[in-house]
Amino acid sequence: MNLLASMRYLVALNEHKHFGRAAQACHITQPALSNALRALETEFGVVIVKRARVYVGLTHEGERVLATAQRMLRDNEVLLQELRSDVDNPHGRLRMAAVPTAIPMLSRFAAMLQERHPGIVPAVLSMSSQDLETGLESLSIDLALGYTERMHLPGIKLSAWPQSVEHYFLLRRANKPSSDELRIGEPIAWAEAGKLPLCLLTSDMHNRAIVDQALREAGAPVNPAIETNSVLALALAVSAGKVCSVLPGGMVDAVRTHRELEALPLVGPDVRTPIGFMTQDGVRASRALEAALAFMQAPEWQAHLQEHDGSLGD
């Protein structure tokens, strides 16, 4: 039995919650995955997977094996990167994830990091805040970009690096397209915005909780016309239809070439939400992660943050 491979299959099963999809993700057949997990149970002398016709979860002992598997796979990746890298040329994968509204920032960070260190292969993932927390806890994510004020994991300490503060805007179609780029209009009250047909993120997204709270504080109803879990869908819905949306400045900045749109700063209440990078504290960093943490302090990234801080000249 290849212990490391079997551990990888177990982690994949926990991630996909489905035998067939886990096997597909590992590029093996479903019977091969099932046989490897049974061999793992024989090796440790415990039942790992609850037996049923479909996947229903892991046993208590299986959860303990899973935690060890997650640490083993991370330690293996860290070791591989140390063996393949030197001080100035890190090599290896770097799994990064961001809440949907911070994807533009993370995408630019990944591109600039990869340009500086061509041996690093970043993975840029979009996740809800809850999935970010799960990824940090399970070590399946090396670096998370999200709402630092809500990231409190029981029994796990996080390190955070503040990056920006979200400012919020009402995005809508302009009466007349501008000559060059999206126009920044006069401020609008949240109470007025709440009267408009809004396209908002789904309720499982933390950004939606921020928007809902601001609308309630302003005495406005929370009754979206469209819901989506994609920030791209928000912008496209506004561009194509008669709905409006609420987006942070970083996302508005990302669609600034759309001349037919305009963004109005939202006021009353004045909502500001900090965004930052986070990692699990006390975990040995890979060479790729070390390079990413160092790049956060680099002058070119700091200058980029100031240029794209999301205030849009506010």
Image: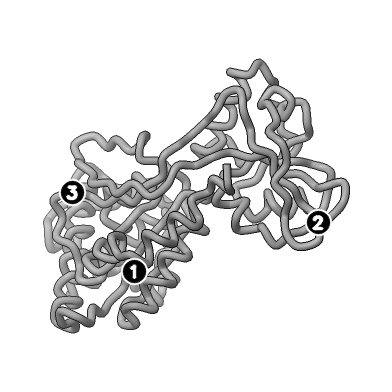
**Which numbered disc covers residue 143?**
none
Compared with 208, 20 (above or below) is below
Quarter of the figure that contains the C terminus:
top right
Kind of residue indicated by mark 1: Leu
Residue at image point 72% right, 54% down = 182
Give the CA separation, mark 1 to mark 2: 57 Å
Q: Is residue 116 visible?
A: yes
Residue holding disc 2: 178
Compared with 312, 208 (above or below) is above
Circle 1: is it few (<14), some (14-19), or many (20+) Cα within 10 Å? many
N-terminal of the two: label 1 or label 2?
1
Disc 1 and disc 2 in contact, CB within 8 angstroms: no
Q: Is residue 28 visible?
A: no
Residue holding disc 3: 281
Compared with 165, 47 (above or below) is below
- In which quadrant of the rendered view does residue 285 lie? bottom left
The local secondary structure at tag 3 comes to: loop
The local secondary structure at tag 2 comes to: loop
The local secondary structure at tag 1 comes to: helix
Residue at image point 63% right, 19% down = 218
Kind of residue indicated by mark 3: Asp
Q: Position of residue 171 (x, y in %)?
A: 71, 44
Nearest to the eye among marks 1 and 3: give it: 3
